[in-house]
């Protein structure tokens, strides 16, 4: 959860690509296709399904494979009865999980033991734009693996050994860094080696930047990453509530965050 900003920078949402690119922008798709050595048009031009949409598609029987990573939807999702129905109708559910007590494991066809933060090495970015290298300090137990290792092994088993020939998380980070060159979230001067030697650094951190130098406030120069260089403001009306109270659902529950406790 503290890496929510880093996840967005890396394209970890259904409508995003690495480096704050969007799947709906043809130029962004073309860049990533070249970067990954894909054929033109291989990246879909439409965003994927949201988590709630996935549940509905599972319930209809049209989603045949569902992979849950590092979350416990049978606790955190709304309308757990609908989710249970969807998961039981889905032919194959995979759950990557570090904790054997996760409720979602009950409906998994395959459980992949995952390494947690203390057992793997990776970088995270907080809302201050500060990139921190988090080194694991113990080995994962049993057959547990870091997420990048699991995805890389799957890629190789699906026949794409060249694209997934990673041997360390630093190589995955280097590939991501290359996608940020010239972008607002410029990482081009960062590496695991530099972060390990000099500690957390703020982006933009471009080639030639000095470790520890304080970044100025982003957009203090009044230049924004738009075609005109000017900020774009959007005025919108608040949306209606998607669901109203009823006899079946007489209460609203709003989950929140307190210090280190998040949604799951």
Image: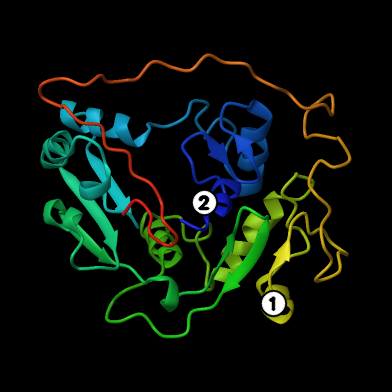
Quarter of the image where one finds residue 26: top right
Q: Who's the residue at 84% across and 29% down the image?
A: 229
Report helix, strand or loop for mark 2: helix
x and y, in percent, of residue 2 in the image: 51, 58
x and y, in percent, of residue 233 in the image: 70, 22
Does 259 appear above or below 241?
below
Left or right: residue 231 versus residue 239 is right
Report helix, strand or loop for mark 1: helix
* Colouring used for the render: rainbow
Question: Looking at the image, is mark 2 or mark 1 nearer the viewer?
Answer: 2
Q: Which residue is mark 2?
A: 4
Does 88 appear above or below 190?
above
Crowd class of label 2 (few under 14; some 14 to 19; many from 20; radius 10 Å): few
Left or right: residue 37 versus residue 97 is right
**Depth check, front residue: 16 or 2:** 2
Q: Who's the residue at 36% across and 80% down the image?
A: 140
x and y, in percent, of residue 193 in the image: 69, 77
Q: CA distance from mark 2 to mark 1?
A: 23 Å
Say which mark, if any, is on residue 184: none
Does 254 appear above or below 111?
above
Q: Who's the residue at 73% across and 23% down the image?
A: 232
**Depth check, front residue: 79 or 30:** 79
Quarter of the image where one finds residue 19: top right
Quadrant for the C terminus in the image: bottom left
Left or right: residue 119 versus residue 17 is left
**Depth check, front residue: 262 or 156:** 262
Circles 2 and 1: CB atoms closer than 8 Å: no
Crowd class of label 1 (few under 14; some 14 to 19; many from 20; radius 10 Å): few
Say which mark, if any, is on residue 193: 1
Q: Who's the residue at 48% across and 17% down the image?
A: 238
Does 144 appear above or below 28?
below
**Depth check, front residue: 201 or 21:** 201
């Amino acid at each position: 959860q503290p890496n929510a900003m880093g996840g967005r920078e890396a394209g970890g949402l259904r409508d995003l690509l690495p480096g704050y690119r969007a799947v709906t922008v043809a130029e962004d798709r073309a860049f990533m296709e070249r970067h990954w050595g894909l054929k033109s048009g291989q990246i879909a031009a439409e965003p994927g399904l949201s988590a709630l949409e996935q549940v509905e598609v599972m319930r209809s029987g049209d989603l045949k494979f569902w992979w849950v990573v590092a979350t416990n939807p049978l606790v955190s999702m709304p309308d757990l009865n609908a989710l249970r129905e969807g998961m039981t109708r889905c032919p194959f559910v995979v759950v990557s999980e570090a904790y054997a007590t996760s409720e979602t494991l009950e409906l998994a066809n395959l459980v992949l033991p995952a390494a947690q933060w203390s057992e793997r090495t990776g970088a995270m970015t907080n809302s201050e734009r500060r990139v921190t290298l988090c080194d694991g300090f113990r080995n994962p137990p049993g057959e547990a693996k870091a997420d990048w290792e699991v995805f890389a092994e799957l890629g190789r088993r699906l026949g794409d050994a060249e694209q997934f020939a990673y041997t360390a998380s630093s190589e995955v980070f280097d590939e991501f860094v290359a996608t940020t060159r010239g972008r607002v979230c410029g990482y081009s001067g960062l590496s695991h080696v530099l972060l390990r030697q000099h500690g957390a650094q703020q982006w933009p951190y471009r080639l030639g930047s000095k470790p520890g130098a304080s970044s100025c406030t982003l957009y203090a120069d009044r230049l924004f990453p738009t075609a005109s260089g000017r900020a774009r403001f959007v005025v919108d009306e608040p949306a209606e509530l998607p669901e109203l109270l009823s006899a079946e659902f007489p209460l609203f529950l709003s989950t929140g965050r307190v210090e280190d406790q998040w949604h799951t």
